Image (cartoon, rainbow, N blue to C red):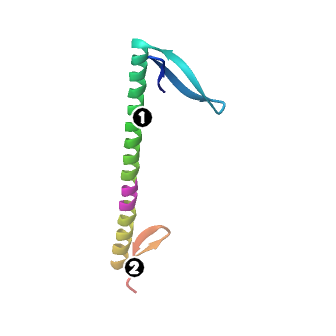
Amino acid sequence: MGWESRGSKKYYYVKYRQDGQVVSLYTGVGRVAEALAARAAGKRQQQREAEEAWAEYKKVGALLDDIRELTQILTQATLLAEGYHTHRGQWKKKRDD
């Protein structure tokens, strides 16, 4: 999307792909074109912010996965050190024979 100069005038075009080719759609000049350009810029900014938020969400999710895995390992090590074992998926205290 953008402004194109033709002589001394500027025209606003919206570009998109159709069947693998870039198509330019004339949208206007003057106030209407400026409003459309501002709206498009706002949408692009929102998209960038959403992508940044998603990237941050994925980072936090990866950290939480690491913490969960380390907690499981620590819990298992503690239970084994205290004399527990797993039987059919349950932790049970070993019997003293």
Position of residue 76 relative to residue 6, above or below, is below
The label on residue 47 is 1
Q: Amino acid at mark 2?
A: Lys
Along the horizontal axis of the image, is 15 left or right of 93? right
Query: Which residue is located at x 40 percent, y 58 percent?
Result: 65
Along the horizontal axis of the image, is 62 left or right of 27? left
Residue 1, image x and y in percent?
Answer: 48, 27
Whether residue 63 appears in magenta in the rendering, the answer is yes
Q: Amino acid at mark 1?
A: Gln
Q: In the picture, residue 46 is in which quadrant? A: top left
Q: Which residues are magenta?
A: 62-67
Residue 11, image x and y in percent?
Answer: 47, 18
Please tell me which residue lies in front, 53 or 94.
53
The label on residue 24 is none
The label on residue 94 is 2
Please tell me which residue lies in front, 97 or 60.
60
Tag 1's secondary structure? helix
Whether residue 49 appears in magenta in the rendering, the answer is no
Q: Quadrant of the C terminus?
A: bottom left
The overriding secondary structure of the stretch rendered in magenta is: helix
Q: Residues within 10 Å of mark 2 (few under 14, many from 20)?
A: few
Q: Residue furthest bottom?
A: 97
Please tell me which residue lies in front, 60 or 24.
24
Q: Residues within 10 Å of mark 1 (few under 14, many from 20)?
A: few
Judged by depth in the image, the label closer to the viewer, 1 or 2, is: 1
Query: Which residue is located at x 43 percent, y 19 percent?
Result: 36
Are discs 1 and 2 less than 8 Å apart at CB? no
Mark 1 and mark 2 lie on one chain; the one further toward the N terminus is 1
Residue 33, image x and y in percent?
Answer: 43, 16
Tag 2's secondary structure? loop
